[in-house]
């Protein structure tokens, strides 16, 4: 059904970069055979899934949405892929994305843009635009995305599906091609909250191959979905509800808060005073880490190599000039500048200090509140081409998701109605490693 749906719709949506058709059919047949012999069903038995194309899959092309990795067939599976296999899910293909996960509209894919299944002239969001659109279009029953500054939550909001960014460290990054290592997290995109809990259950947990993987006990996420939110205290940051937020989006969030109230939760307005500095701090830190992480793409070790290089420097220079797209180059240049000697203290170090202040805002709020709720993004999905020439406007779309990433706390985006017929996302943010409360509230609302 999944493969048929992809065949029928993906020429319009453009969510997939590579299909895994033959293997998927074989795996499905093998699972059937196992079951016939009395084998047990895994947690995700036979469920067709799509994987964002920055998560490596053994023998299955992994491009990161970049021409640089057009010919890259990884020789190992990411830990999340191994875990999905153990849960008996079936990978149907690899999903389109902004190149190296840099972007918020999927227009930075070096292959083709993804279209929002709700309105084909609109962006699906990004960078996990393929992952969100595939679920919205019914092509896969869940997908994995990655979120560095909003890339799971914002496309989930634009496509009317559920996207969860787990606490930093809960899900292994081993095999996730690094963009900004101190921020990157893998998480599920699903049709509903229960599915999100299932997939999180399958992929969470400590991994010795990721040095930032947390050693925490993994709770039973499914049994947390009790429907009960009585007595929960919710803070609503005024900075997420003010200037720049579309009035219809704000209205939908206020309506959602009324629903929580009717279920016995309480909410009040709070302040996260350093929110204004989050976007600037994020773009410095993420670009700095990216400039360092992407130095491995030199035309020697991975992917595409420039033809007939005159010497080693020419090989590096031309492979990188030809292989990377404009947004990736912009970030590498920004990041290299911010890290260069003489500027490091003024930019990178300052941005790290601001990050600490932002994290403190959250710590203080969570002393008093169980959850923080606001919009996922200031607007619904915009038109393809509308912001592509204006990186600063594009960066500002992340204002409600970036602070959460800098603080490392978990957050989910769930659908909460529409604005001019387009889906609006509600963002529910929790304490470190308190995915259970986030999922419980999201599920009760849904
Ligand atoms: N839009 C943000 C950026 O371009 C977030 C990307 C992400 O989370 N991967 O950096």
Image (cartoon, rainbow, N blue to C red):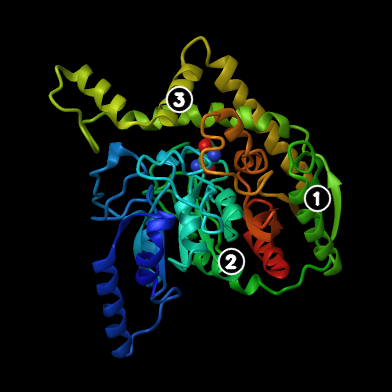
Marked residue nearer the N-terminal end (2 or 1):
2
Q: Quadrant of the N terminus?
A: bottom left
Task: Measuring from the top left, give residue 18's x and y in whole percent.
Answer: 31, 55
- Determine which residue is flagged by label 3: 330
Residue drawn at x 58%, y 51% as measured from the top left: 153
Q: Quadrant of the C terminus?
A: bottom right
* Label placed on residue 235: 1
Q: In what element is the residue under mark 3? A: helix
Q: Nearer the viewer, residue 286 or 3?
A: 3
Task: Measuring from the top left, give residue 242's x and y in whole percent.
Answer: 80, 39
Tell us which disc is closer to us: 3 or 1. 3
- Determine which residue is flagged by label 2: 219
Q: Nearer the viewer, residue 422 or 166?
A: 422
Q: Nearer the viewer, residue 126 or 358?
A: 126
Left or right, 350 with respect to 204, comes to right
Choose top left, top right, bottom left or bottom right for residue 179: top left
């Amino acid at each position: 059904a999944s493969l048929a749906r992809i065949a029928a719709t993906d020429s319009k949506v453009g969510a997939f970069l590579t299909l895994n058709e033959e293997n998927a059919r074989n795996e499905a047949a093998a699972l059937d055979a196992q079951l016939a012999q009395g084998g047990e069903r895994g947690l995700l038995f036979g469920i067709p899934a799509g994987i964002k194309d920055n998560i490596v899959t053994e023998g299955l092309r992994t491009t990161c949405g970049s021409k640089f990795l057009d010919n890259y067939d990884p020789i190992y599976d990411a830990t999340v892929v191994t875990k999905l296999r153990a849960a008996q899910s079936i990978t149907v293909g690899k999903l389109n994305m902004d190149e190296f996960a840099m972007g918020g509209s999927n227009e930075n894919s070096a292959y083709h843009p993804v279209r929002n299944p709700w309105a084909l002239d609109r962006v699906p969001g990004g960078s996990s635009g393929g992952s969100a659109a595939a679920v919205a279009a019914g092509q896969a029953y869940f997908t994995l995305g990655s979120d560095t500054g909003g890339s799971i939550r914002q496309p989930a909001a634009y496509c009317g599906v559920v996207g969860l960014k787990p606490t930093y460290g809960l899900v292994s990054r081993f095999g996730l091609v690094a963009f900004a290592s101190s921020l990157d997290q893998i998480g599920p995109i699903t049709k509903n909250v229960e599915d999100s809990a299932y997939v999180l259950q399958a992929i969470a947990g400590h991994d010795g191959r990721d040095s930032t993987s947390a050693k925490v006990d993994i709770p039973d996420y499914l049994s947390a979905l009790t429907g009960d939110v009585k007595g929960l205290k919710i803070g609503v940051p005024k900075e997420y509800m003010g200037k720049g937020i579309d009035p219809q989006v704000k209205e939908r969030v206020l309506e959602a808060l009324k629903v929580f109230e009717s279920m016995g939760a309480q909410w009040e307005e709070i302040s996260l005073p350093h929110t204004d500095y989050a976007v600037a701090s994020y773009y410095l830190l993420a670009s700095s880490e990216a400039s360092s992480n992407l130095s491995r793409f030199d035309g020697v070790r991975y992917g595409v190599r420039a033809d007939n290089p005159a010497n080693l420097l020419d090989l590096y220079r031309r492979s990188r000039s030809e292989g990377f797209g404009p947004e990736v180059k912009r970030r590498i240049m920004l990041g290299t500048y911010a890290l260069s000697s003489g500027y490091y203290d003024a930019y990178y170090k300052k941005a790290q200090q601001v990050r600490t202040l932002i994290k403190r805002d959250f710590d203080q709020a969570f002393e008093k509140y169980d959850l923080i709720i606001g919009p996922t993004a200031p607007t619904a999905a915009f038109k393809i081409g509308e912001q592509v020439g204006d990186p600063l406007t594009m960066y500002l779309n992340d204002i409600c998701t970036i602070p959460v990433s800098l603080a490392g706390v978990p957050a989910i985006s769930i659908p909460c109605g529409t604005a001019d017929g387009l889906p609006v996302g509600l963002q529910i943010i929790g304490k470190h490693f308190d995915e259970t409360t986030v999922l419980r509230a999201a599920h009760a609302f849904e």
